[in-house]
Image (cartoon, rainbow, N blue to C red):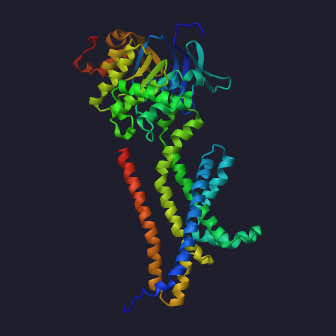
Amino acid sequence: MNYQFDLFFIANGLWPLLKGLVVTLELTVAANIIGLTLGFVIALLVMNPNPILRWPFTLFIEFFRCTPALVQIVWFFYCIPIIFDVYIDALTMGILAIGLNLAAFNAEAYRAAIQGVQSNQYDATVALGLSPFQRTVYVVLPQAFRSALPVLVANGIGAFQQTALVAIVALQDLMYMGKILATDTYRPIEVFTVIALIYFAISFPISQLVEYIERRRKAENS
Amino acid sequence: MANTKYLVEMKGLHKSYAGGVKPVLQGLDISMCPGDRVVVIGPSGGGKSTLLRVLMGLEDIDKGQLLFQGKNYITTDKYGKTVIDKEIRRNIGMVFQHYTLFPHLNILQNLTLAPIKVRGESKQSAELRARGLLTRFGLEAKEKAYPAHLSGGQKQRVAIARALMLDPKLMLFDEVTSALDPELVAEVEQVIMHLAEQAMPMVIVTHDMHFAKNIASRVIFCAGGVVVEDGPPEQVLGRPKEARTREFIQRVFHIGETEGVGRELSI
């Protein structure tokens, strides 16, 4: 390969890339707030014994789990404004699409963690006279949150990477700014390498942190 | 309080699993006096653990009645639904085979959670009592430790202390030493013996016949969901009247192998 790498030019393109990164981080943080809170509520609803309350949310989870995220984003951007005759700005729409997707996956993480609390813990709370509410708040949820945490963080990182998909609907995130810069400079290799490194530099420490937490938990429970 | 000499009365208790397909208790009648230390023995699947779980209010019943100090504790309503008096249930404490400590709370918090949340006791008072119990059980150095860092024997002693925090009038022990390494069994049994000396009424399910012999004031042999034999340990463990009891006792003491029919245990 006879290609001359030139990373110097990127100094000129740094400012738009940074602006794109800010949009990416905004998307990530907002989507995670939706994912962590709404996901929890949905998890409680899908565990409701009442099937009428349960099935719309089961459907919600399955819709987001069984369709590609890219399709979901495109669908949100093009179909929602037409179907509901509303205009929602691009950033909000991106946050909604990625946030709802994350909520569906997090709901499954919460549900598995809550159902993973051992049944003998329930026996112990009954023997100690705790009410169902006290059992949920003081015994089940604290244990469930702990065991769900690694999956929630991993899903959160996944959402961070998925934000790159919004570039396709012209939301000016890191990926979109990169594409513009690559076209402007005719330097796609450098630009996309730098972009990949930025995603990596943010995801990698967090995924290492998750592994550390998991290792510590395993050591604690052995 | 109703006038009765019994602490617990079970009348015609029926219980089945899988919607009536698998009967476990088939008409149990047991009356227990306040001074009784009842050890329940019997083959697995004979209903021993279910009996304790019903007593603790952890299982629904199909039919029958359970009185505690002469008051209705567990009954069924006209639709066959189990009705449990939760106030009465608070008089009973239970320790399980698999410790069931709360893994996310340290030892002190394990002991004080129920007194603070259920009884509304102040944190200071609950912690003071908890420290007293932990000291009594030789666990005072462990109050800040988490259950995962304790040995099986220590966990089980903590579980006993946790149940005692609620001042139970009856303690249930469900195979509490079965999951322990042999060298850890004694420390747990000593704690239970200690409670027995303080006249704590208890029902114990155990496979440890020597412990049963030492602690019981009364032994019940339960098989096929009914009481087969009920009497003092010298009788049930020593000279059982019923053939099924005799067979079981011989099997668990390994004396059948030497044609030991009729040979007696020295108690």
Residue B195 image-quadrant placement: top left
- Outermost residue, right side: A85
Looking at the image, is B157 positioned above or below residue A186? above
**Percent from the top left, x then y, of residue B12?**
55, 16
Is residue B22 at all visible to an observer of this figure?
no
- Outermost residue, front side: B124
**Percent from the top left, x then y, of residue A115?**
52, 45
Identify which residue, A38 or B209, lies in the foreground.
A38
Identify which residue, B122 or B143, lies in the foreground.
B122
Which residue is drawn at the image coordinates 47% and 77% (left, top)?
Answer: A195
Q: Quadrant of the C terminus of chain A?
A: top left
Identify which residue, A91 or B64, lies in the foreground.
A91
Q: Quadrant of the N terminus of chain A?
A: bottom left
- Outermost residue, left side: B258
Is residue B266 at all visible to an observer of this figure?
yes
Which residue is drawn at the image coordinates 38% and 44% (left, top)?
Answer: A221
Looking at the image, is A63 positioned above or below residue B231? below
Looking at the image, is B182 positioned above or below residue B242? below
**Percent from the top left, x then y, of residue A219?**
35, 48
- Outermost residue, bottom side: A2
Which residue is drawn at the image coordinates 37% and 53% (left, top)?
Answer: A215
Looking at the image, is B107 positioned above or below residue A191? above
**Percent from the top left, x then y, of residue B40?**
41, 19
Which residue is drawn at the image coordinates 34% and 26% (left, top)?
Answer: B188
Q: Is residue B160 left or right of residue B14?
A: left
The number of callouts visible is: 0
Residue B62 image-quadrant placement: top right
